[in-house]
Amino acid sequence: MEIQTLATQDKSLLSIAEKVVNGERLSLQDGLALYESSDLLTIGQLADMVNQRKNGDNVYFIQNLYINPTNVCEAHCKFCGFRRDLGEDGAYTMNKEELLHYVESRIHPGIREFHIVGGHNQHQPFEYYVDTVRTLKQAYPHVTIKAYTGAEIEFFSRISGLSFREVIQELMKAGLESLTGGGAEILTEEYRLKMSPEKASTDDWLAVHRTAHELGLRTHSTMLYGSIETYEERLTHMIRIRELQDITNGYLVFIPLAVQPKKATAGIKRRTSAIDDLKTIAISRLMVDNVPHIKAYFINIGTQLTQVSLRMGASDVHGTLIEERISHSAGALTQQALTVDELVWLIKGAGKRALERDTFYNVVKEY
């Protein structure tokens, strides 16, 4: 794409476009200019160009099953509607039999990944979390175990007295094959002290993932946007992911997550806007230039915006999920799951190639 072909009236985007065309890295100030611009189509065009270089017309999805073994949690994050205190109405902690029954009643032969996250339940020992992985891996050895957030690993370290490395090694012995991207929220201490003060610090979260990468795991990374953070904090978050990726090359995907209001009845002003959602996906593609994929998470932004995002930098539409609980325990109004046919319809409707993948982006089937 020649810079001259950009039909933008926003002259601040021209120097950024020149960098993008030449494959140069964008700065935090460039990111701010992108967020402050109202020219969404040009921003999306630039992000699409970067994504085309990396992935062509390929868009990926996986057949996966979400598992939340417990919702009891010591933390009181301001954005969470999922957590409960021990004994509170709705609180639960699955034992081995309940865990296996949950999976047995939902699994089908196409499932390739268990995505496991839950509360920081301080009433259970570290071995409970290890046993969760071991139980599932023994029962379903062919299914990849992608389990726990960086914040959960930090929590396990505290309750066990083990280092991050030792915690991850114990989980790997039980069958862990990848870490989820959650618990990152916004990677600045100003944000975390206000929104999630009882959870892992910025440095802790990054250290967990760095350690996982050093141990040979490929992991995911998220960003929970749309509450009190500034644009500068979002961009700082992206740059911190980018800087670690420069060192380890361990991230497979970056996932912008739109924060959900506490109740489904919340009005539209309590939700992120379509413009912000699409702009954040596009800017993520432009800023996080060394992570292969940007994921559009239909659970948070809906199926229509997910489809549009495939022309604005996204190359992954996540998966079938079967039953998503965390966003829907807050105010998510979207589907809790999609079928393979629906995901393929979304992807092909955007003029893209629909590729079913495994956890590590190896292609399983083209539709």
Image (cartoon, rainbow, N blue to C red):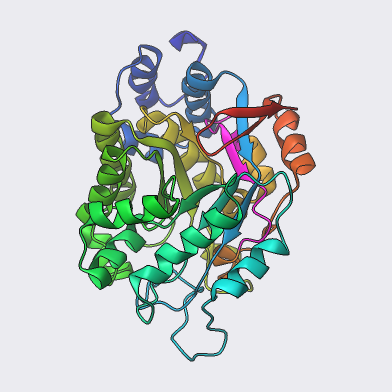
Q: At x 47% / y 81%, what residue is drawn?
A: 84
The residue nearer to you, when weighing 246 against 81, is 246
When the figure is inspected, residue 81 is found, relative to residue 47, above or below; the finding is: below
Q: At x 59% / y 66%, what residue is drawn?
A: 325
- State left or right for residue 339 relative to residue 307: right
Residue 9: percent from the left, percent from the top? Answer: 46, 24
The residue nearer to you, when weighing 129 against 303, is 129
Residue 184 seen in render: no
Residue 214: percent from the left, percent from the top? Answer: 26, 38
Q: Quadrant of residue 126?
A: bottom left
Residue 238 seen in render: yes
Q: At x 50% / y 19%, what residue is drawn?
A: 49
Q: Check residue 313 for magenta coloring.
A: yes
Q: For the C terminus, which image quadrant?
A: top right
The residue nearer to you, when weighing 233 against 33, is 233
- State left or right for residue 173 relative to residue 363: left
When the figure is inspected, residue 193 is found, relative to residue 361, above or below; the finding is: below
Residue 17: percent from the left, percent from the top? Answer: 39, 19
Q: Check residue 172 for magenta coloring.
A: no
- State left or right for residue 300 relative to residue 249: right
Q: Quadrant of residue 366?
A: top right
Q: At x 79% / y 40%, what residue is drawn?
A: 341
Q: How many marks?
A: 0
Residue 234: percent from the left, percent from the top? Answer: 34, 47
Magenta segment boundaries in residue numbering: 309-324
The overriding secondary structure of the stretch rendered in magenta is: loop
